Each structure stands twice: as structure tokens, then as C-alpha cells.
Amino acid sequence: MELHSLLMFAAAYLAVVVLPGPSVGALVARVLSRGTLGAPSFIAGIAAGAIVWLNVAALGLAALAAVFAPVLVAVRYAGAAYLLYLAWKLWHAPPRPFEGAAAMPENAARLFWTGLAINLGNPKAVAFFLALLPTVVDLAGLTPLGLAELSAVIALVVAIVFGGYALAADRARRLFRSARSLKAINRGSSVVMAGAAVMIAGR
């Protein structure tokens, strides 16, 4: 695929991804309360969901996605339910120093599937790709290599944007050390994560 087409696609996708949404809120809330351990798995799930929607749009399967709308609704609610579970755990979690929290074991697979469910539960994503792709890509001449290049762009943009949010949240977390401030962070993060779950479920 031509470089200028990839750059146009990357710029348009970046402009959308950089805007804070429920997935960003969920990531930031989690990093504030537990550190960055496990964040890459969540981010990878978000990227995987976007790549799935890209392929659905590029292969002309939007109508098929509409047929499976009930499944997508179930996926969205599953992702929102898990975020609510995490919010409940954060609310009741004892305050731990940053170093101790960062060493806690994480279920990487569960975090990946949560990120994936959040993105797959958002059918507006396929509408975005359906609107964007014809303006920057010759869909009739799109090759598997071109689709792979677009997927790589998505993965890179998601990694940069969400990684930036995670690092900023991690840096902010390090400013708070007292048990009282850590408890406030946990509960504030719990509220943000629960709000993200409600927004996802209400789409």
C-alpha cells in the first residue's frame, strides 16, 4: 500500500483514538489503582478488537455484523460486567504501596479478553472504518499485505496512545504514597471504572 495512504489512515485513526472514552477510562482507573502490570494485555485486547472491525469493514461484512448484533450486545455486556467486577474489587481493596501493588499477579488472558470485548461490543467502530477506508484505500485493490499493513498501523496507534495514557496514570500514581491517598485512589478508580462499564453497556 502507498505510504501516503497509510499516513492518512494513521492520522485519521489517531484523531479518533486519542479522544478519551470508556476504554481509556477503564485503563487509567486500573493503572492508578494497580500500576502498569497487566496494562499491555488490556491494550492488546483493545488493538485486537479494532483490527477485527477493520477486517469486517474491509471485507464487506458489515451486513453480517448486523445479523450477529445480539451476539455483539452480549459481548458488550460481558465486558461491562467484568469492569464492574474490577470496580467492586478496587472499592474494597486495602491500600497497598505502589511497589507491592505492581508485584501482584495478574490474569493477562482475562485482561486481554476484557479489552477485546470492550472494542467488539462497539459496533460504531465498524461504521468508522466503513466511512474512513473508501477515502484513503482502494478497497477493490486491497491485498492481504495491504490489510496487514493497516492492521499494523492500528496496533501501533493503539499502543502509542493507550501506552501514553497508562504511563501518565502510572506517573500520577507514584505521587501518592500514604495509605489514605492510596485508598482514595482505589475508590476514585473504582468509580471511574464503574462509570466506564455503564457507558459501555449503555451504548
Image (spheres, rainbow, N blue to C red):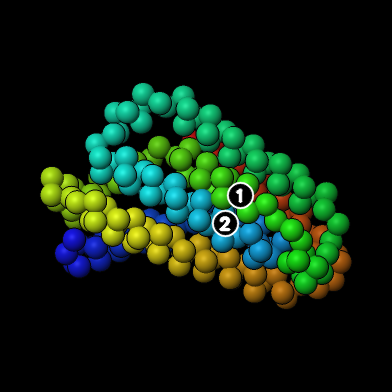
Q: Residue at x 18, y 50 (%)?
A: 142
Q: Nearer the viewer, residue 24 or 74?
A: 74
Residue 4 is labelled as none
Q: Earlier in the sequence, mark 2 or mark 1?
A: 2
Answer left or right for 91 relative to 81.
right
Q: Position of residue 100 (x, y in %)?
A: 80, 68
User: In this figure, which residue is indicated by the disc labeled 2?
Assistant: 41
Mark 2: amino acid? Ser
Q: Would you call the spot at circle 2 few (<14 residues within 10 Å), some (14-19), or many (20 or more)? A: many
Q: Position of residue 85 (x, y in %)?
A: 71, 41
Q: Above or below — where is 69 with respect to 5?
A: above
Split into 4 quadrants, where in the image is the N terminus? bottom left
Rendering quarter of residue 4: bottom left
User: In this figure, which residue is indicated by the disc labeled 1?
Assistant: 109
Q: Above or below — where is 159 with respect to 79?
A: below
Q: Secondary structure at mark 2?
A: helix
Q: Position of residue 24 (x, y in %)?
A: 54, 55
Q: Secondary structure at mark 1?
A: helix
Mark 1: amino acid? Ala
Q: Residue at x 34, y 61 (%)?
A: 153
Contact between labelled residues 1 and 2, with CB atoms less than 8 Å apart? yes
Tally the marks: 2
Rendering quarter of residue 186: bottom right
Rendering quarter of residue 175: bottom right
> Can residue 29 be spotted in the picture?
no
Q: CA distance from mark 2 to mark 1?
A: 7 Å
Q: Position of residue 12 (x, y in %)?
A: 30, 59
Q: Residue at x 40, y 63 (%)?
A: 157
Answer left or right for 197 relative to 8.
right
